[in-house]
Image (cartoon, grey):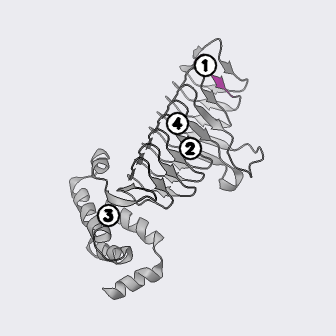
């Protein structure tokens, strides 16, 4: 192990620190924590475990990463937190370990940015390149796919899924699954538009962005029920990978009986 541990920091016996790890003044690292190479725990931050934090992660002051789940069923079992590489946890962020009933592990991918005051509850599963703006709150068991961005003061109910590349506008209260590639807003959050800026930032090809715009218009911008719009969009979809991903996501959530009725109506 090589790195810099401040004299006032507490690193418990059993903690595993990679090379070039830094632990700042009055920080605390638990004994069942693994910190990857080049990770930094700044002053007065706390890392609890069992937890594995990947390489080049930065944990800012007063963040608590790896705390016990806030769940009445939790009875002290050694559940875990798994974090990938190049993540940033800003001030006062809280991330909790999993529960046995939820699979035992909370997971965060790589290159995520959790801004000040954000909260990731037990058993959440975050993909890569996720941004949670200040005071975003995820309830337990939430699944966040790659490239999702949440604006400030967003609240997501337990067991909700945020689809790939969606944008959740600031102040949204989300109680149902969010499809990929769209913008949702409001209390309760509903689909408002296609996430055009996010698609460009993701590097989605121009042809696919155009195909997604056509699909979005077919599904959400008419007066027909979504099941009817989905059937219409499927007929016109072609082989575009991104459109297929959107349609498959929606098809999973619309009962087969409604899809059959929409097919008959055409």
The quarter in which the C terminus is drawn is bottom left
Taking the image as shown, residue 231 lies to the left or right of residue 177, namely: left
In this rendering, which labeled residue sits more in front, label 4 or label 3?
Answer: 4
Q: CA distance from mark 3 to mark 2?
A: 30 Å
Q: Which residues are magenta?
A: 24-30
Proximity of marks 4 and 2: CB atoms separated by less than 8 Å: no
Taking the image as shown, residue 184 lies to the left or right of residue 9, namely: left
Read off the residue under disc 4. Answer: 117
Proximity of marks 2 and 1: CB atoms separated by less than 8 Å: no
The quarter in which the N terminus is drawn is top right
In this rendering, which labeled residue sits more in front, label 1 or label 4?
Answer: 4
**Residue 135 placed where, x, y %?**
50, 40
- Front one among 173 and 140: 173
Read off the residue under disc 1. Answer: 1
Read off the residue under disc 2. Answer: 120
Is 3 placed above or below 135 here? Answer: above
The answer to which of marks 3 and 1 sits earlier in the sequence is 1
The answer to which of marks 4 and 3 sits earlier in the sequence is 4
Read off the residue under disc 3. Answer: 243
Q: CA distance from mark 2 to mark 1?
A: 30 Å
The answer to which of marks 3 and 2 sits earlier in the sequence is 2
């Amino acid at each position: 192990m090589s790195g810099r541990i401040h004299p006032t920091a507490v690193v418990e016996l059993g903690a595993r620190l990679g090379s070039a790890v830094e632990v700042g003044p009055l920080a605390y690292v638990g004994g069942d924590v693994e910190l990857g190479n080049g990770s930094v725990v700044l002053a007065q931050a706390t890392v609890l475990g069992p937890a594995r934090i990947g390489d080049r992660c930065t944990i800012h002051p007063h963040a608590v990463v790896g705390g016990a789940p806030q769940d009445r069923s939790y009875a002290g079992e050694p559940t875990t937190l798994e974090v990938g590489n190049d993540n940033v946890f800003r001030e006062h962020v809280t991330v909790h370990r999993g529960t046995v009933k939820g699979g035992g592990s909370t997971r965060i991918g790589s290159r995520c940015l959790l801004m000040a005051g954000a909260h990731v509850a037990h058993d959440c599963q975050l993909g890569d390149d996720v941004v949670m703006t200040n005071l975003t709150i995820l309830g337990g068991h939430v699944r966040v796919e790659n490239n999702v961005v949440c604006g400030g003061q967003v609240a997501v109910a337990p067991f909700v899924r945020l689809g790939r590349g969606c944008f959740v506008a600031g102040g949204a209260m989300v109680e149902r699954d969010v499809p990929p590639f769209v913008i949702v807003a409001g209390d309760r959050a509903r689909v408002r538009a296609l996430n055009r800026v996010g698609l460009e930032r993701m590097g989605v090809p121009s042809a696919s962005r155009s195909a997604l715009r056509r699909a979005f218009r077919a599904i959400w911008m008419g007066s027909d029920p979504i099941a009817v719009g989905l059937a219409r969009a499927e007929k016109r979809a072609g082989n575009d990978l991104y459109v297929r991903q959107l349609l498959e996501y929606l098809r999973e959530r619309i009962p087969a009986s409604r899809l059959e009725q929409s097919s008959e109506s055409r």
